[in-house]
Image (spheres, rainbow, N blue to C red):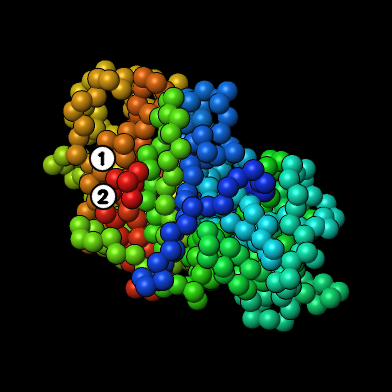
């Protein structure tokens, strides 16, 4: 679930759909950017939306994904290219975007996430495909589809031990998952359309043999991570090497509004009032690493400590910014200190989380004294609002929107809501500005 979940199991799901209208797009050539809508997977505009599913169950699924995503991220650390070692859960990912492949365009609705690189979709003729409700992409009907030669630079850089040449000398990919899910096919180039922006020669995987526990509405995976062949990295040949998003608050119980978040590729002037922290280059390149120095609750600050080393210096790149993870996952010792300080500041009788995922919860109407919680990044202090600190888990209960982890910390999408979050990949910075994203 970074924008996140996702190749892996922060997972990006893709849905082929004929019913969905094209993405709303904003484009300004003079500034060098274009913008598309991001739709929360639990909003009424999402094809994932199930009106019969209780709100508490929907939010419970999202919270559980946070813990699964944290496990997946830490298993991938230190690898040149992430391996898919955790179980694929069909509800992974949080925000959807419209995207089209080929000429003529074949539209899909994809869950956008910053934790994924190489994209793949189900393609015809499908030797073995999991059941899918809509028509699959047929490369033979597209005038712009081109398979990549197995001796090309892209193939060599993307290759895994399982990668091989086909009889036609085209580059093959094979992505496998611990639960037995997989995709096998041809690494290819194709024209991609986002809004009204046409992007030729984008590299992706055309999967001709796919299987596992995917949903019938899934068509594959889309990557927006930091790797060289993610969609974000490839777009930098058309617009400046920057992207950003503004996430509207998580849908509340009985919320029937159809508002959308925004994702922008390229330059955009957001004016003053933002703070910035360096992006730290680390492997795997998929993730967007920042340095968290500490967390404050009111006037009490809890600094990050490196318990795995005798060194007193703060480890750089100790947190990733990920829109595909719901909760913010803090180092275990800091989490318990923050939780205790929030509990002391709120000073109310606690409630039980009906989903049994979180353990500091209150009756929503009683919490009027919200403590000031500040994330202290390297060079940037980000003060959170109430909707960033507490998540609504039922009509009457809110819970602390943080969780513990024993390894790499994750800055999740609840903490990013109503902030303009901008990634400057050329200058290696990420910026935050408090913003009413429903009016952005």
* Secondary element at tag 2: strand
- Residue drawn at (58%, 37%), measured in percent from left and top? 48
Which of the two residues, 15 or 301, is positioned nearer the viewer here?
15
User: Looking at the picture, does residue 161 appear above or below residue 356?
Assistant: below
Q: How many marks?
A: 2
> Relative to the observer, which residue lies in front, 11 or 136?
136
Q: Is residue 53 left or right of residue 387?
A: right
Q: Quadrant of residue 31?
A: bottom left
Q: Report how far apart the C-alphas of labels 2 and 1 lie in the structure.
A: 9 Å
Q: Is residue 317 visible?
A: no
Write the residue at 47% across / 25% down. Answer: 56
Res 385 label: 1
Q: Residue furthest left?
A: 299
Residue 403: x percent and y percent? 39, 38
What residue does disc 2 label?
434
Work out whether 177 lies above or below 284: above
Whether the residues at callouts 2 and 1 have beta carbons within 8 Å, the answer is yes
| Residue 435 showing in the rendered view | yes
Helix, strand or loop for disc 1: loop
Residue 329 location, x and y as percent? 39, 44
Left or right: residue 384 compared with residue 256: left
**Residue 65 image offset from top left, x and y in percent:** 51, 40
Residue occupying the point 66% across, 69% down:
190
- Asked if 60 appears above or below 425 in the picture, the reply is above
Nearer to us of marks 2 and 1 is: 2
Please name whichever residue, 315 or 135, is drawn nearer the observer in this view of the structure.
135
């Amino acid at each position: 679930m970074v924008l996140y979940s996702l190749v892996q199991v922060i997972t990006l799901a893709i849905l082929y759909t004929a019913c969905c209208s094209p993405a709303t797009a904003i484009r300004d050539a003079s500034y060098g950017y274009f913008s598309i809508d991001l739709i929360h997977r639990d909003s009424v505009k999402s094809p994932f939306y199930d009106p019969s599913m209780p709100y508490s169950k929907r939010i419970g699924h999202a919270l559980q994904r946070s813990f699964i995503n944290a496990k997946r991220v830490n298993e991938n650390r230190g690898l040149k290219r992430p391996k898919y070692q955790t179980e694929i859960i069909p509800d992974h990912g949080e925000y959807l975007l419209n995207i089209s492949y080929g000429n003529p365009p074949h539209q899909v609705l994809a869950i956008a996430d910053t934790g994924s690189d190489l994209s793949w979709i189900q393609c015809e003729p499908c030797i073995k495909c999991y059941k899918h409700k809509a028509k699959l992409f047929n490369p033979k009907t597209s005038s712009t589809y081109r398979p990549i030669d197995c001796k090309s630079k892209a193939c060599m850089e993307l290759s895994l031990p399982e990668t091989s040449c086909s009889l036609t000398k085209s580059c093959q990919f094979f992505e496998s998952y611990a639960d037995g899910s997989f995709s096998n096919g041809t690494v290819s180039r194709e024209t991609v359309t986002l809004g009204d922006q046409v992007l030729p020669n984008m590299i992706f995987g055309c999967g001709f043999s796919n299987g596992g526990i995917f949903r019938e509405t899934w068509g594959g995976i889309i990557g927006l991570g930091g790797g060289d062949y993610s969609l974000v990295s490839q777009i930098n040949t058309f617009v400046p090497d920057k992207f950003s998003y503004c996430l509207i608050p998580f849908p509340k119980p009985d919320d029937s509004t159809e508002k959308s978040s925004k994702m922008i590729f390229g330059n955009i002037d957001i004016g003053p009032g933002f703070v910035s922290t360096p992006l730290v280059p680390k492997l795997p390149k998929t993730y967007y690493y920042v340095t968290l120095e500490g967390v404050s609750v009111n006037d009490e600050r809890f600094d990050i400590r490196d318990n795995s080393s005798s060194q007193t210096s703060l480890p750089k790149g100790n947190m990733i910014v990920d829109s595909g993870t719901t909760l913010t996952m803090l180092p275990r010792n800091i989490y318990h200190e923050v939780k205790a300080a929030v509990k002391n500041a709120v000073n109310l009788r606690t409630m039980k989380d009906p989903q049994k995922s979180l353990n500091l919860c209150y009756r929503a109407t009683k919490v009027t004294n919200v403590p000031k919680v500040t994330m202290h990044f390297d060079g940037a202090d980000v003060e959170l609002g109430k909707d960033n600190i507490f998540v609504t888990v039922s009509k009457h209960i809110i819970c602390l929107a943080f969780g513990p982890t024993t390894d790499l910390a994750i800055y999740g999408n609840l903490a990013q809501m109503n902030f303009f979050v901008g990634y400057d990949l050329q200058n290696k910075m990420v910026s935050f500005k408090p913003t009413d994203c429903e009016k952005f």
